[in-house]
C-alpha cells in the first residue's frame, strides 16, 4: 500500500501524526491524483536532510508507528522533497487501522 507523508527534518520533537485534512495543494488536475499526493501522515524527525539521514529516520519512525518492520517500508518517490510516498508491505486493512489510530496533528 502506498502512503503519502509530509516530513519535517531537524525537529526538536520527533513524532508521527495523522493529518486531519488534505494539504492545501489544490484540487486534483489531469496529472495529479489527490489521494495519492496529499499527505496523510506528518513525520517529524531530529535527523537533518543530509545524505539520506532524514529519509532513513522517517522510514524507521513510520515503521514503528505503523507496527511493521523497517524493511517493509520503502521510499517510492520524493527522495529530495518534503512530501514523500512510501510503499508499505503490509496487509491493507491492518495498515489503515494503524493509520487511523495515530494521533491527529494539532493545528496551530
Image (spheres, rainbow, N blue to C red):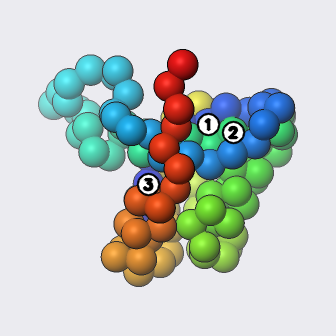
Determine contact: label 2, label 1, CB under 8 Å.
yes
Any part of residue 28 in sight: yes
Any part of residue 78 in sight: no
For the point 62% across and 48% down, which residue is it?
16
> Residue 8 appears in which quarter of the rendering?
top right
- Which type of secondary structure does the marked residue at label 3 adopt? strand
How packed is label 3: few (under 14 Cα within 10 Å), some, or many (20 or more)? many
For the point 66% across and 76% down, which residue is it?
69
> Residue 9 appears in which quarter of the rendering?
top right
- Position of 29 with respect to 63 (left or right) is left
Closer to viewer: mark 2 or mark 3: 2
Closer to viewer: mark 2 or mark 1: 2
Q: Position of residue 49 (x, y in %)?
A: 78, 33
Look at the picture and state if 26 lies above or below 104.
above
- Position of 17 with respect to 20 (left or right) is right
- Give whichever of 44, 20 is nearer the camera: 20
Q: CA distance from mark 2 to mark 1?
A: 6 Å
How packed is label 1: few (under 14 Cα within 10 Å), some, or many (20 or more)? many
Q: CA distance from mark 3 to mark 1?
A: 13 Å
Q: How many marks?
A: 3
- Which type of secondary structure does the marked residue at label 1 adopt? strand
Q: CA distance from mark 2 to mark 3?
A: 16 Å
- Give whichever of 55, 46 is nearer the camera: 46
- Position of 6 with respect to 92 (left or right) is right
For the point 56% across and 66% down, which residue is it?
66
- Which type of secondary structure does the marked residue at label 2 adopt? strand
Give the residue number, with chain letter if any, for mark 1: 7
Give the residue number, with chain letter if any, for mark 3: 3
Q: Position of residue 79 (x, y in %)?
A: 62, 41
Q: Position of residue 99 (x, y in %)?
A: 45, 60
Q: Position of residue 60 (x, y in %)?
A: 72, 60
Amino acid at each position: 500500500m502506498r502512503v503519502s507523508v509530509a516530513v519535517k527534518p531537524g525537529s526538536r520533537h520527533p513524532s508521527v501524526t495523522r493529518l486531519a485534512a488534505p494539504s492545501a495543494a489544490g484540487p486534483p488536475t489531469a496529472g495529479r491524483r489527490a489521494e495519492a499526493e496529499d499527505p496523510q501522515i506528518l513525520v517529524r524527525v531530529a535527523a537533518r536532510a543530509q545524505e539520506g539521514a532524514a529519509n532513513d529516520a522517517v522510514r524507521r519512525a513510520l515503521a514503528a508507528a505503523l507496527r511493521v518492520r523497517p524493511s517493509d517500508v520503502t521510499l517510492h518517490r520524493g527522495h529530495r522533497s518534503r512530501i514523500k510516498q512510501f510503499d508499505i508491505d503490509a496487509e491493507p486493512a491492518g495498515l489503515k487501522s494503524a493509520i487511523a489510530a495515530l494521533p491527529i496533528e494539532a493545528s496551530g
